[in-house]
C-alpha cells in the first residue's frame, strides 16, 4: 500500500516536526540552568535561618528588645531575599522566552528552507489510486500517486501534535 521513496527525508522531516512540537519542553531544562539562586541569595537565606534559630532561644517576654532587634534583621533580610528572587525570576522569564523564540525560529526556518529545497522530492508513493487527491498530494512532484514534501510535513506535523498532545499537556 505504501512505498517509501526517500527514507532519509521521511525521517528528517519527522524529527524536525517532533522538535517543533517539543520546543517548550526543551526550553525548561535549558532555562533551569540560569534560574539557580546566586551565592548571595544562599548566604542571605542561611543568615535568615541562623537568626531564626537564635531568635527561638530568646524569650519574647523577658528580652523583648533583643527579640525585636533580631526580628527587624530577619525582616530586612527577607525583604532583600524577596527582591533578589523577584529579579532572578524576571531574568529567568526573559531567558526562557528568548531560548524558546530562538529554538522555534531555528526549527521553523530549517523546516521552511528544507521544504523549499526538497520541494520536488517525493517522500512516499501510494500503491492505490487516490484520484481526486492525487494532484494535491504530489504537487509539485511529477511522480504519480506520490506524497510531496509539503504534504508530508503537513501530515507529520498534525500527526505528531495529535500523538504528543497528552504528553505535552
Image (cartoon, rainbow, N blue to C red):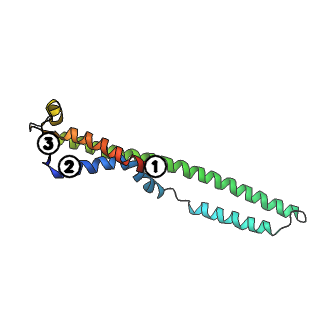
- What is the crowding at mark 3: few (fewer than 14 residues within 10 Å), some, or many (at least 20)? some
Q: Position of residue 29 (x, y in %)?
A: 44, 57
Of residue 125 and residue 123, the one placed in the foreground of this image is: 125
- What is the crowding at mark 2: few (fewer than 14 residues within 10 Å), some, or many (at least 20)? some
Mark 3 vs mark 2: give the one in front.
3
Q: Classify mark 3: helix, strand or loop.
A: strand
Closer to the chain start, of discs 3 and 2, is 2
Disc 3 designates what residue?
126
**Residue 99 visible here:** no
Residue placed furthest toward the right: 62
Left or right of residue 112: residue 3: left
Of residue 136 and residue 112, the one placed in the foreground of this image is: 136
**Residue 168 visible here:** yes
How far apart are labels 1 and 2 at the CA level? Answer: 31 Å
Mark 1 vs mark 2: give the one in front.
2
Disc 2 designates what residue?
10
Disc 1 designates what residue?
96
How far apart are labels 3 and 2 at the CA level? Answer: 14 Å
How far apart are labels 3 and 1 at the CA level? Answer: 43 Å
Amino acid at each position: 500500500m505504501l512505498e517509501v521513496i526517500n527514507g532519509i527525508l521521511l525521517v528528517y522531516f519527522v524529527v524536525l516536526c517532533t522538535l517543533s512540537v517539543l520546543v517548550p519542553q526543551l526550553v525548561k531544562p535549558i532555562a533551569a540552568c540560569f534560574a539557580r539562586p546566586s551565592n548571595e541569595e544562599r548566604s542571605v537565606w542561611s543568615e535568615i535561618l541562623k537568626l531564626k534559630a537564635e531568635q527561638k532561644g530568646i524569650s519574647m517576654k523577658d528580652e523583648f528588645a533583643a527579640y525585636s532587634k533580631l526580628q527587624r534583621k530577619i525582616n530586612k533580610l527577607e525583604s532583600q531575599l524577596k527582591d533578589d528572587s523577584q529579579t532572578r525570576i524576571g531574568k529567568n522569564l526573559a531567558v526562557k522566552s528568548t531560548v524558546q523564540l530562538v529554538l522555534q525560529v531555528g526549527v521553523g526556518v530549517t523546516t521552511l528552507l528544507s521544504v523549499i529545497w526538497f520541494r520536488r522530492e517525493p517522500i512516499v508513493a501510494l500503491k492505490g489510486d487516490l484520484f481526486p487527491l492525487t494532484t494535491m498530494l504530489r504537487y509539485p512532484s511529477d511522480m504519480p500517486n506520490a506524497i510531496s514534501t509539503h504534504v508530508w510535513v503537513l501530515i507529520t506535523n498534525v500527526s505528531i501534535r495529535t500523538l504528543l498532545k497528552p504528553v505535552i499537556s
